[in-house]
């Protein structure tokens, strides 16, 4: 049994003479959150549509849940769930009726359908509003119901396309907790999002797509370490110690007013330990130190040439 929930090799897609995907490779480990980031038009939606069998690739291969997306489309669809950017609930039905409709479409049977609907209403804290029309639900409740509907068929892999767009901060964090709970139960999440803090909070690995090509991939921490600007800030008790540290750390930048020293660093344990050991070697005491690293917005800007806000709005 492979540990990969999704694999892709050389996926290509073009519309007329415009290449949307120029041969991308993916390997998403089972039971993790994989986030695909990129500016609008980078190819994120095309990638998701191909992997969910909604669109045929022009070239390359991919397997989802162990099934080939080209020759085993029905098996792929049976193994996945897809929650789009906009909730697909039926406003003319109650929350409970929306879930029962999904259970009927999946031929679960009356008893099993009843158990699944009851469990999901409780899991998503929708039991009290189960018999209210979905049209009366708040944005957060609608997103919860939409995701609950996706889970009726117990998918092993869920594609979440910008699941918290338009939600208030409290509802966003509620959705984050739900995603973490799903992953803890072994579900694989393929996430696209316009919020870099969301990817930072949730993703085990992140891939950045730009103009149809993967320009970087790694854990959030690995991606941040690739971008210059990381540093350690040291603060000293007096000017004498600050001056001594400045002399032995030639690449550092002192701030005499705050008695602080900025030292370039990748923020890794080894480099920080080496820095502190060097200060200790010269018997220079440090009052405090803090590690400052670039955030994912810095990474996005460096890799795509646009800030995340600008790129996602285009």
Image (cartoon, rainbow, N blue to C red):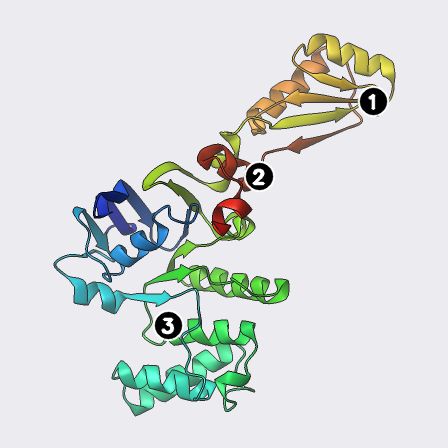
Q: Is residue 88 left or right of residue 124?
A: left
Which percent across, then down, holds residue 55? Answer: 23, 59
Q: Residue at x 23, y 61 (%)?
A: 53
Q: Nearer the viewer, residue 48 or 310?
A: 310
Q: Is residue 186 visible?
A: no
Determine the image quadrant of residue 107: bottom left
Q: Say whether residue 38 is left or right of residue 67.
A: right
Can you identify the residue that label 1 sits on? Answer: 259
Residue at numbered disc 3: 150
**Image depth: mark 1 or mark 2 in front:** 2
- Residue extending farthest left: 71
> 309 or 186, which is in the foreground?
309
Q: Secondary structure at mark 2?
A: loop
Secondary structure under tag 1 reads loop
At horizontal 73% and vertical 8% (from top left) the residue drawn is 247
Compare marks 1 and 2 and give the one earlier in the sequence.
1
**Residue 295 numbered tag:** 2
For marks 2 and 3, give the CA distance.
32 Å
Asked if labels 3 and 1 touch by Cβ distance under 8 angstroms, the answer is: no
Could you tell me residue 138's position as x and y percent? Answer: 57, 77
Measuring from the top left, give residue 284's x and y in whole percent. 77, 15
């Amino acid at each position: 049994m492979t540990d990969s929930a999704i694999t892709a090799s050389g996926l290509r897609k073009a519309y007329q003479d415009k290449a949307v995907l120029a041969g991308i490779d993916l390997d998403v480990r089972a039971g993790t959150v994989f986030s695909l980031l990129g500016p609008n038009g980078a190819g994120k939606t095309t990638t998701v549509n191909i992997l969910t069998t909604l669109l045929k690739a022009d070239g390359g291969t991919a397997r989802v849940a162990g099934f080939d997306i080209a020759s085993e489309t029905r098996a792929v669809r049976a193994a996945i769930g897809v929650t789009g950017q906009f909730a697909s609930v039926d406003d003319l039905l109650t929350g409970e009726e929306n879930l029962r409709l999904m259970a009927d479409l999946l031929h679960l049977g009356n008893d099993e359908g009843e158990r699944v609907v009851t469990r999901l209403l409780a899991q998503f804290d929708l039991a009290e509003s189960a018999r209210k029309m979905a049209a009366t639900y708040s944005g957060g409740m609608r997103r919860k119901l939409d995701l609950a509907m996706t889970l009726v068929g117990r998918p092993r892999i869920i594609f979440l396309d910008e699941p918290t767009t338009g939600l208030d901060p409290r509802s966003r964090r509620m959705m984050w907790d739900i995603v973490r709970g799903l992953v803890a139960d072994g579900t694989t999440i393929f996430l696209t999002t316009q919020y870099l803090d969301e990817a930072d909070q949730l993703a085990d690995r992140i891939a950045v797509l730009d103009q149809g090509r993967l320009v970087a991939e790694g854990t959030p921490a690995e991606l941040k370490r690739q971008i210059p600007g990381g540093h350690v800030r040291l603060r000293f008790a007096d000017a004498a110690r600050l001056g001594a540290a400045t002399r032995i750390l030639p690449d550092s930048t002192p701030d005499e007013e705050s008695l602080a020293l900025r030292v370039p660093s990748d923020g890794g344990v080894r480099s920080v330990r080496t820095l502190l050991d060097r200060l200790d070697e010269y018997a220079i005491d440090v009052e405090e130190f803090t590690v400052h690293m670039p955030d994912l917005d810095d990474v996005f800007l460096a890799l795509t040439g646009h800030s995340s806000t600008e790129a996602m709005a285009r």
